[in-house]
Image (cartoon, helix red, strand yellow):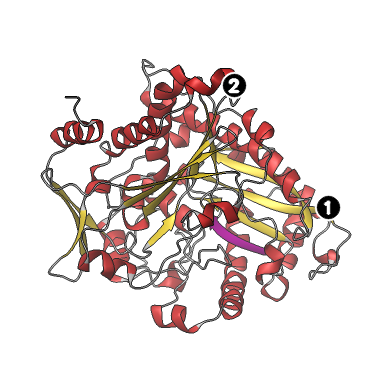
Amino acid sequence: MQPNRKTSTRHTASALIQAQEFELSSIDIAQGDADINFVLYYYGASKRHKKRRLPVSCLKASLISAVQQFPIMLGRAVATSDSGLKVVVDPKDLNWPDITEASVGNMSIASLQRNGFVWSHWPRAADTIDLVQRPSQPMVGVHIVRYVCGGISVHIKIRHLIVDGNGTWRFYSAWARICQNACKKFGGRLLVCSQDEPPLLSRSAMFSKLLPPVPSQDTENAGARVAGYIDEMSQFFDRVAECRLHASSLTSAHKYDYSVRKFILTHEAITRLKVVHGQLANCSPEHMSFVRAHNITYVSTNDLVCSVFWRAITRAHYALDPSDPNTCMMLACDMRSRIGLPQTYTGNASFPLIMHMDKSQMQRHTITDTATWIRQQLSILTPAYVRHMSTFMASPEALQKLISIFHPSNSFFSASIINGFPMFDMVDFGFGKPVHIDIPSYITPGFSLWMPTRPTAQSVKVPTTAIDIALREDIYQLLINDAEFSEYLEVTY
């Protein structure tokens, strides 16, 4: 009698996992759950490839192999005596991912929804409590969709309360590596894409965009290997973003054509990356006390796709050495006096901006109210942002232009934390700003500036005089020409 493949795989994984607990900080439990990016598999759909169709069991086995490298994903949430939260991993009672399957005729959102796939799972105040009250709920949910055209997509939902303790990109890079090896014999080709928008590209366009090869595991310098992989992933996402940008420009909702300037931390900074399960790495006791003492929360709504908590900057701040000024990201700003951080704090002078909105505000505000509130908070930020940038500015004239445009009365940018590619029609979401800053929360520890090169024929809500091409190029040139700044940043197109 043949053994049950599913049972045997899980049994093997259980034997490799030890009993352990993960204490969660207020940052970890600030958000309940959300869909992270999804992984798409495409392979030959011609008749001669029919016999080599990628089996779903291959994907499930790859997922289990990746998950066991991050045991917290197999744990259960438990309340602590001090009203905190921890995840307990019991090898005898692992909380396996919930895997559902469907078969659809095409890649449209309607087809996915008819088969039970919910595109967006945004946080609710009750999510964390619900996890404690019903510990049988899985930390990870997987939805596998097979398409008639021959493709397979795997959509993953991971609880945010465990993502930050692990580092999202670490999990996906591990799973991508395992899947690549498992899919080789099926002639499979792997593509990683974003969950923020439906897949707009044609199958042929996506098929031609391949995930870059994972660096060899025998490289002596582990830090350089990780940095090289991130760099390759960045280039890959840039290629896909170009296609998505073109596809989005064809939709009626698109208001601008965008010029992209992507700033990525250099390899020297990336090699300092350190991720500690559920804790802040390399932070002073004062920093830890501040984070735990303040019930730090942020708002994120389905329609705005925007976080008030600058999650990516915070992750970069505590994942990199905060005492090393070279690891300071440009968008971090000195907000100690504003947020009440003790002046005796001896870490890096720059601290990530934290915008507070308590749960009652989140429940009471409408989308429009939230957008207005975000805009007000960003206006408060801009003077500090300019002061921070001034150390990198070589031209006083250009700095004066920046100060005048960044003034709270006419600040021109909006910002969001994204799990993938940015939203292109942000003027429809209440920001009303022609410049948008996107801070990716995984893959690349950097940020992107999205600036319109020209308005489309459609009417726009923002005066075209708010920013001009000459000023934009001044900013760009100042950044890349400054020796101190450019030493630690790479600029890609």
Q: Quadrant of the N terminus?
A: top left
Q: Secondary structure at mark 2?
A: helix
Kind of residue at badge 1: Ile
Residue at image mark 2: 47
Q: Residues within 10 Å of mark 1 (few under 14, many from 20)?
A: few
Q: Residues within 10 Å of mark 2 (few under 14, many from 20)?
A: few
Kind of residue at badge 2: Lys
Is-magenta flag for residue 84?
no
Q: Earlier in the sequence, mark 1 or mark 2?
A: 2
Q: Quadrant of the C terminus?
A: top right
Q: CA distance from mark 1 to mark 2?
A: 52 Å
The image shows residue 464, relative to residue 477, as above or below, that is below
Residue at image mark 1: 469
Q: Is residue 491 visible?
A: no
Magenta range is: 412-417
What main secondary structure does the magenta stretch of the protein show?
strand
Locate residue 7, reporting x and y percent.
20, 35
